[in-house]
Image (tube, rainbow, N blue to C red):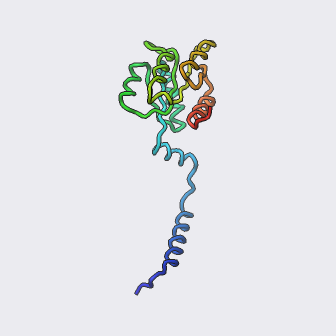
Amino acid sequence: MTKKLSTEDLIKKIERLTKQRMAEQPVVELNQFRDVKNKLNPINILVIEDDETQRNSLKRILEAEGYVTRMAADGPELTQILDEDHEIHFIIMDVGLPWINGFELAQMIKDHRDLKKIPLIFLSAQAEESDFERAREVGANDYIKKPFDIDKLKIRIKELLSGEK
């Protein structure tokens, strides 16, 4: 006949077995935790860049950081992405885009009720003072000149996603 456990004994037995099994588990590295978190709650970054080499480079850089990237070469490709109803958390955009330049496109995005709060960074080879001023006018959070420092871009994305200015 099996001995009946008291509630107190049952709790102790469960705690002991749980601690024992937890101690047997391998230590989870921070990168593994980040990877699981990103799979459950991915951060989607939209890259609007007409140069294919730049687009692919940005895709590799961002995905290595755990972000999901959506890529558009111009306005028409952007409309396809917006039509697919992907949630977008961050936008990186070139200024020199065909058909509709980046400033015009950014203004349209910042005028949109659902997209206006999304952080936006311009990455561009254009670097006149008037470009920086225009970026501020259309509501961009930053303007980074190409060629750009990869680490600076990563840091700036993290700052803006966490709400830092």
Percent of width and height locating residue 96:
51, 14
Q: Quadrant of the N terminus?
A: bottom left
In the image: residue 152, left or right of residue 48: right
Query: Residue at 36% of width from left, 28% of height from top?
Result: 83
Q: Quadrant of the C terminus?
A: top right
Q: In this view, does 72 lie above or below 40?
A: above
Query: Residue at 57% of width from left, 15% of height from top?
Result: 134
Q: Which of 56 and 145 is in front in this view?
A: 145
Q: Nearer the viewer, residue 18 or 119?
A: 119
Percent of width and height locating residue 52:
47, 21
Query: Residue at 44% of width from left, 30% of height from top?
Result: 114
Q: How many labels does the image show?
A: 0
Percent of width and height locating residue 27:
57, 56
Q: Is residue 77 above or below residue 41?
A: above
Query: Residue at 53% of width from left, 36% of height from top?
Result: 64
In the image: residue 85, left or right of residue 43: left
Res 151 quadrant in image? top right
Percent of width and height locating residue 56:
49, 26
